[in-house]
Image (spheres, coloured by chain):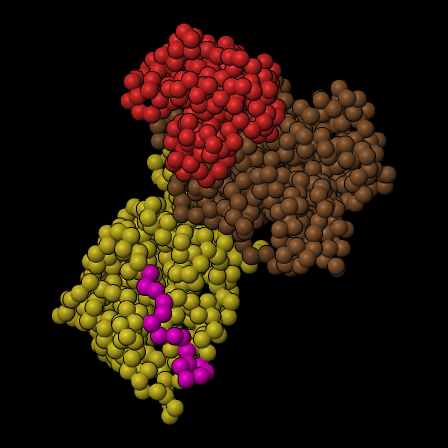
Amino acid sequence: MLQIRLHGRGGQGVVTAAEMLTLAAFYEGHFAQAFPSFGSERTGAPVVAYARIDNKEIRTHEPISNPDVVIIQDKTLLGAVDVFAGLSPNGFVIINSKDEPSKVVPEIVAKLPVGHVFTVPATDFAMQKIGKPLPGAPMLSSLAAVTDILKLESVQKAFQSRYPGKIGDANAETAALAYNFIKGE
Amino acid sequence: MLKQIEGSLGVAQAVALCRPGVVCAYPISPQTHIVENLGKFVKEGSLKDCEFLNVESEFSAMSVAIGSEVGGVRTYTATASQGLLFMTEGVYSASGLGLPMVMTVASRAIGGPINIWNDHSDSLSQRDSGWLQLFCESNQDAVDTHIMAFKIAEEVGLPVMVCMDGFVLTHAFERLDIPDQETVDKFLPKYEPREFINTKEPVSIGAMVGPEAFTEVRFLQQRKMAKALCVIEKVTKEYRELTGSKSGGLLDCYNCENADIKLIIMGSTVGTAKDEVDRLKTQGINVGIISLKSFRPFPYAAIKEAIGDTKQVICIERAFSFGARGIVCPEVKRAMEGTNCDVKTVVAGLGGRPIFGTTINGIVKDALAGKFTEEFTWYDIDTNVLNNSTLKDENVSFSQGPIAQSVLEKSVKA
Amino acid sequence: MLEKIKFYQTGSNTVGNRLITPAMRTIQASVDRPNSLTSGHRACQGCGEALGARYAIDAAMKATNGQIMIVNATGCLEVFSTPYPESAWRLPWVHSLFGNAASVGSGLAAAAKVRAQTNGDNVVPRIIAQGGDGGTTDIGFGPLSGMFERNDDVLYICYDNEAYMNTGVQRSSATPPAARTATTQLVGDKPGADWGKGKDVPLIAMAHGIPYVATASVGDLRDLEYKVQKAMSFHGARYIQILVPCPLGWGLSSNSTVTAARMAMETGFYPIYEAEYGKITSVRKIRQVQPVINYLKMQRRYAHLTGKKADPNVLARLQALCDANIKNFGLVDGTDVTDQPVAMQAYERSQAV
């Protein structure tokens, strides 16, 4: 089972991203489960969402305390929230940032195996294609590129089915940008 | 059809498949997404011949449901927590009038202090309301149980509360198998109301009953509850044969063969516990889980059979009775009367405190080590938080770890 | 309004059936009256509520060709009409709770619509929800407002006897000032119900903009029948509040229920009017304006206002209140509604300042 924790702020589509992640996994025949950290968080407050992907039925409903992947949609959370709490020693980290991982989180880069920490300018990609700072799709396609558990097409299909038309297509294009960005590294 | 959707949407789709004639709604977290979706189905026309009423309170939600059931129409509503309490007077009226409506309770703690997270104190507060109370362990279970609930309610002539854990299930996005309309239509026939009013054959419903017949009215209600035990089993069997589902039933056993200890659990904790039980098995510890689905009527005989000759049973309870102890445990003890089975309560997971696999692991190991010496133990209590209050106010402190009832009682004497 | 009847018997304010055309005679006068609330029920002698309900429901039955279903709030009417295993109701009737008649009515109306739709019936039964003033103006007020706001197809009838009679005459928000109830006793230096409290539900109903609102009285049964029939010609939420004196609660002799109700109208104490979509369309004019004392002195709940110890100021205040009603609602012939009608409590509250 792959366990993923997504960090962001209210309004950035963190919960939607977790749901789209599991929808993409569902398209590929996996069992998947997404759920938000339940609270009364308002726009701008730190938000956490979780996702699990497995090849058999997922029965557990406990929160994820030891994630295999941490996705950070908002760089300003670093230092404000312990986003790496419980992260598996062989885990992956994907951060929404223009800067190099070694510059953003040098201590994590040092701690995890080489090539396990990634940054991707997801907001820039989103602004280019969607025109709004919604980094969900590029962060998920980055996850797909990093772990190969999903195909880019599945991530794109998930967004296109949730948001048929222009918005879905823009998300799909943003996803492609981020996917190629990681794969090209 | 397989779908990757939110539990609430799954339940809304299941309810829509049952073709309700009236759905009434008042917003309270965490049931909101269910009725929002149903409102959408009615407005877009995919749910036909259905009136969707936005009412001004839960009291009115229940009252509208009473009115529409009395008018002979299949009816659905949903609530949680404070909302369930606010409609309580109507909850009792609905069962007393024998109205077979279905209501989801997206289980959530009751305030004060206000708390929006999941436990079972709301649904269990309605233990004696005369409703059937069916608990769901997963969203698939919830989808299927809602469909079965209409059939059970209508056959028994009593309302059914489908209790699903708020947020943990309602807001989880999972793979669900939603039956098609044809299957549900085959399973659930057109509603033929029994207790209803119409202008062709005028009757009075809800007359005042005095001491001369009140006991008999109650006896007949209790008889319906007894009948419900059989109906739940029958309807479950029928539904499983038709759809291949594993949902429903009075209770469900997991790994119960030759178990050293059995856990009785209601709701979404069952799934978490199943994973942990598998891990414990690899360590040579054999734990059985009895997932209690029907809390009312309480399946005494089925519980006794499920426990069998296991000597140690722990009820993991997500609510308790103030000034008394557990709520499920006394029922299990009644079922096991005359045997030497040891039944205890462990309270955990109140007000949204998560029950992890590790929590289950701890409970099992403590139980096997004989650490639960009393009937009632607070398991996942944070004594740091506790001592912050008691040390300052009364110079009383508690040591780290679970707290048994006698420790609590002694702390008052000191 | 009804056609004005000009001919009165000398020395009396009643109009006999034989003096009017058959078309204008009451439904109750007809041999084929529906008798929806039939005899044998257990109401007190002289019960205004039983009288009001019988006229109102029969009128509704007549207007809809028998297509009426009733939701009854808890209260006297429910208790005296349906002691198990008997029922005085000869039409479909349901009782659930004290405070939920309006919303049970909403549900029943929705069900009637859906059933007619799915069964292919052309006739959709109409719904009446009814209760006393306690069940309407107090405990059932939220559901009532909700039913109004949604404009559900329900006629709500409030039988207003100005207190909780079923539980033993306690004060409700429809209890007028200075009246004795079990919770506003005639003791202390301000005996009876407080001044400047209470609410005017007909005006509140009008503020919801619902199709039809009316006040009525068992003091004018023809007007009552007419208003119920008129209400049934509308769809959507409707409200009729009927003054129904309670001999027991008011301390009236049981043969003076109708007289007391009439006095309440003729003094201006209880304005009788109807409104459509929030605007008053007609007012029942007072025939001979009576001083309020003539109304009060019939009732032991106002016993402290007569006799040697009576406080003339209290009487003056009650008279002022009637005068304000007469002016505001244009209750006297030749006058019109001068201002936007206001709740009678407003007058009291402004005077208190």
* Magenta span includes B334: no
B341 above or below B409? above
Chain letter, colour red: A
Q: In the picture, one chain is yellow; tell me its letter.
A: C
Point 32% across, 64% down: residue: C200
Q: Which chain is brown?
A: B
Name the one closer to the observer, B300 or A126. Answer: A126
The relative height of residue A179 versus residue C126 in the rendered view (above or below) is above
At 75% from the left edge and 36% from the top edge, which residue is drawn? B314
Residue A68 visible within the image:
no
- Residue that sits furthest to the top in the current view: A184
| Residue B149 lies in quadrant | top right
Question: Residue B244: where, in percent of width, then height?
Answer: 61, 18
Relative image position of residue A109 (x, y in whole percent): 51, 19
Please tell me which residue lies in front, C165 or C92: C165
* Any part of residue C171 in sight: yes
**Relative to A2, C268 lies left or right:** left
The residue stretch that appears in magenta: C186-201
- Residue that appears at 37% across and 92% down: C308
* Image quadrant occupied by the C terminus of chain B: bottom right
Residue ranking furthest to the bottom: C308
Splitting the image into 4 quarters, where does residue B245 fall?
A: top right
- Residue C190 colored in magenta in the image: yes
Q: Can you tell which quarter of the image residue C152 is in? A: top left
> Which is more toward the observer, C109 or C352?
C352
